[in-house]
Amino acid sequence: MNNLIGIIAGDPESINSEIIAKAWKKRKSFKKLNILIIGNYDLIKKQLKKIKINVELQKIDNFNKVSFKKKLNIYDIPLKFKKPFRFSAKNKYTYIINSLNCGIELANKKKIMGLINCPINKKEIFGEKPFGITEYMAKKNKRLGDEVMLIYNKKLSVSPITTHIKLKKVPKNISSLKIIKKIITINKFFKKRFKFKPKFGVLGLNPHNDEFRNDSEEKKIIIPAIKRLKSKNIFLDGPISTDTAFLDFKKKKINVIIGMYHDQVLSPFKTIFRFDAVNITLGIPFLRISPDHGTGREIIGKNIANPNSLIECIKFFKN
């Protein structure tokens, strides 16, 4: 269906049911788009009842003769254990993975136009592996290594070359080829989606770019990548020193800042834009987006969660 978005309910111990219901109540803001929740019907119903959010739900197992306008439809993912709302690590993993796999299958079969996944606790699901949903989606689609994490806001976007790995492993996990591939992917996405070529600001890895010493990653890896990309008519500045990059991006008319590791770009970005952004996975066969916040476990049941990031995810499909 060309106007149906799948929303994976995500972590069962989270604010996800709350933000889904609140987003549904504001469905006029996403007009012709419809949403399908992929998760457990009974769980979502109980969670909404507990916080007294009244939404009419409908359980479905196929797409025939289903109205997507009057009721919030839930593509039911069964819970395969006797105590359905007491999640052990094992049965939480099973539930979330089954939900993700179902969403991926529906997207690849063109039953939905793309996926939004609500937040999960990555450590509980993937343990000590340097893995998140970005990497999981890529692996399931046999695109591991091609995936790109893009945190998007109209004023500025950011993308880390490495994602969910320990800081001490970053230097060995960046390469000129990796930088080139990821920037080309983002450049193509902007040209196709927004009809313009973005300007990139590429950060160095070290403080003050390690003064461009011969043994620095800037000299050995980042500068050769920038030269190669410029030869392909991609607009770039860099290597830019991280300590001023987020002060100067407007003056330099930079659309996308590329960092070498996760927090190098996400920490300053969230300081500026808070949660006014969406997390997009590029390099897989369909559009996948997620809200730019966590599970909100500390505010579960308080009915104070803000659904704006999820709403922005849904509205992004209109672009």
Image (tube, rainbow, N blue to C red):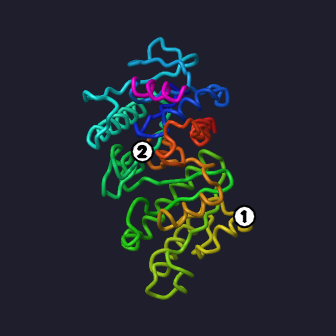
The magenta stretch spans which residues?
A: 42-52
**Residue 4 lies in the magenta stretch:** no
Residue 108, given in percent of the width and then of the height, sits at 40, 34
Which amino acid, by three-letter code, is at mark 2?
A: Ile
Quick one: SS at disc 1? loop
The tag on residue 148 is none
Residue 314, given in percent of the width and then of the height, sits at 58, 36
84 to the left or right of 304: left
**Residue 43 lies in the magenta stretch:** yes
Q: Count all numbered tags in the image, as a single digit.
A: 2
What residue lies at 53% left-to-right and 18% top-to-bottom? 56
The tag on residue 120 is 2
Which amino acid, by three-letter code, is at mark 1?
A: Lys
Residue 311: quadrant of the picture = top right
Residue position marked by numbered label 1 in the rendering: 250
What residue lies at 59% left-to-right and 31% top-to-bottom? 22
Q: From mark 1 to mark 2, how far is it between C-alphas?
A: 33 Å
Judging depth in this view, the residue of 128 and 101 nearest the camera is 128
What residue lies at 36% left-to-right and 54% top-to-bottom? 131
What residue lies at 39% left-to-right and 45% top-to-bottom? 137
Quick one: SS at disc 2? loop
Circle 2: is it few (<14), some (14-19), or many (20+) Cα within 10 Å? many
Residue 216, given in percent of the width and then of the height, sits at 46, 83
